[in-house]
Amino acid sequence: MKIVFYEDFKRTDYAADGASVPGRMERIMDALVGEGGYDVVSHEPASSGDLSLAHSKTHIAGITKDMKLFEMASLSAGGAILASEIAFKKEPVFACIRPPGHHASKNSSWGYCAFCNMGIALLKLREKGLIKSAFVLDFDAHTGDGTLDVHS
């Protein structure tokens, strides 16, 4: 199994919220790597074209005003894209990325989210002609309204 992870996800200076808690990513990665048998792969940030698949120019510009958040959120979206490409090849994959994204809609975001990572990844697969639709199981305590919005 592959784990999509970028060392910068250990940074906590991009936000002051629950998703950026110090030690969170280290504990997750220590547990996964401690199990063994996983191939950790890093990735590139999502491009502006990738981000615009799901988000308006206004929303992207708003996130860009905070460069630390923008850099981390672009890395997160890029990780989701790579994970979707790996999964499409029928390889098991887990993306250990932050900030989360399921509350990021076309024009806004909340709940520690910036960009809709899963939405961007699926729209990228659709843009490449690899999928027509997808089923997203969001097992959070509340709905992934952003994911629903970017696909409507």
Image (cartoon, rainbow, N blue to C red):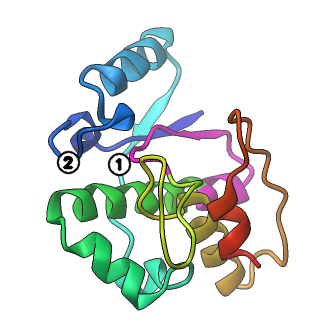
The answer for how far apart the CA atoms under marks 1 and 2 are is: 19 Å
Amino acid on which the number 1 mark rests in the picture: Ser
**Quadrant of the image occupied by residue 77:** bottom left
Label 2, on which residue?
14
| Mark toward the start of the polypeptide (1 vs 2) | 2
**Crowd class of label 1 (few under 14; some 14 to 19; many from 20; radius 10 Å):** some
Which structural element holds mark 2?
A: loop
Q: Is 93 placed above or below 123 here? A: above
Tell me if residue 95 is in the magenta stretch: yes
Q: Nearer the viewer, residue 63 or 89?
A: 63
Q: Quadrant of residue 88?
A: bottom right
In this rendered view, identify the residue nearer to me: 94 or 60: 60
Instruction: Give the residues in magenta.
Output: 84-100
Q: Nearer the viewer, mark 1 or mark 2?
A: 2
Circle 1 is placed at which residue position? Answer: 42
Visible in this render: residue 77? Answer: yes
